[in-house]
Image: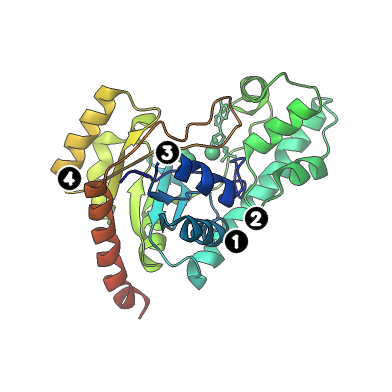
Amino acid sequence: MFADLHLHTRFSDGTYEPAELAAKAHQLGFTCVAVTDHDTVEGCAPMARACEALGISFISGVELTAEFKGQEIHVLGYGFDPADPNLLNQIAQFQAIRQQRIRDMVARLNELNIPLAVERVFALANCRAPGRPHVARALVEAGVCRDVDEAFERFLKKHRPAWVPKRRITAEEAVALIHRAGGAAVLAHPGLYSVDPWLSDLVRAGLDGLECFHTKHSHMTTEYYLSLASRLGLVVTGGSDCHGENKGQPLLGSVRVGPELVGRLRDRIAYRQANRLRLTD
Ligand code: AMP
Ligand code: FE
Ligand code: FE
Ligand code: ZN
């Protein structure tokens, strides 16, 4: 039994439809998957249906963009109720911020005499949680850039000419939001930030786990976070962070986590669900 707990669909910046992703995961031998789109849960219901049809288990997920110690960090939520009204209301606000940011980024590009139409970006994105990858794809389509990487390098990376900062909730708020919806909160790919000295602050805020296994973590980085998770009493998760066929070879299959780990995550989710009633009273 193997799981991939970090996957994107076309409902954020991935390229696969949920059913397509489920079929590919099944083909590769996965028996459990979670969809973790950026700031949206729209992919959860179709993915759950596709997984059920294939006989593999599914965990609802989301990857929330948050702010911690002046950095952008990503907080993964697992096992929450995807119909939770408070969660959906907050997510709708994150999506409105994302949509406005797309307009601002395109305006910057237009000021640089790049005639990109914002409607084209929204049409390409075809989702409620558009992001920089969609602007990048539109730049490639318009022949302005050779590929998505060039678009990020020239225009979209932090402090490049079309980069626009994104208003974010705090990491503590993201954790609380996930807990209120009955889910467990996990810090995504900690090896990509420099927040280790303050991890205990997040644990005090109720953080449940650390994503130790991730495509961008070296073996040593993984070992380091495994020992940190054990010291801090956090559950361990992992996933490929596959975005489909955006950037060459899809990452699906590059990270596989075992049943013990999924079992511990499920225990933590059960604990959060039991506590949910107390939080929403
Ligand atoms: P956003 O949420 O709009 O700020 O976009 C962030 C997303 O862009 C990440 O989740 C990645 O999928 C993607 N991304 C970030 N940096 C790069 C890069 N240098 N090249 C390609 N994709 C990137
Ligand atoms: Fe992404
Ligand atoms: Fe992320
Ligand atoms: Zn991700």
Residue 248 vertical placement versus 175 (above, below): above
Q: Is label 1 in a helix, a strand or a loop?
A: helix
Q: Is label 3 in a helix, a strand or a loop?
A: loop
Q: Is label 2 in a helix, a strand or a loop?
A: helix
Q: Earlier in the sequence, mark 4 or mark 3?
A: 3
Is 33 on the left-hand or right-hand side of 243? left
Marks 1/2: CA distance?
Answer: 6 Å
Residue 92 - label: 1
The residue closer to the viewer here, 244 or 146, is: 244
* Residue depicted at x 57% and y 54%: 94
Q: Which residue is mark 3?
A: 70
**How far from the left and from the top, in percent, is residue 126?**
71, 49
* Residue depicted at x 25% and y 23%: 220
Residue reaching furthest to the bottom: 281
Q: Which residue is mark 2?
A: 96
**How far from the left and from the top, in percent, is residue 243?**
54, 37
Say what amino acid the circle numbered 3 marks.
Answer: Gly
Q: Which residue is mark 4?
A: 232
Residue density around tag 2, few if under 14, some if 14–19, many if 20 or more, within 10 Å: some
* Residue depicted at x 27% and y 66%: 270
Is 211 on the left-hand or right-hand side of 113? left
The residue closer to the viewer here, 8 or 160, is: 8
Marks 3/1: CA distance?
Answer: 24 Å
Say what amino acid the circle numbered 1 marks.
Answer: Ala
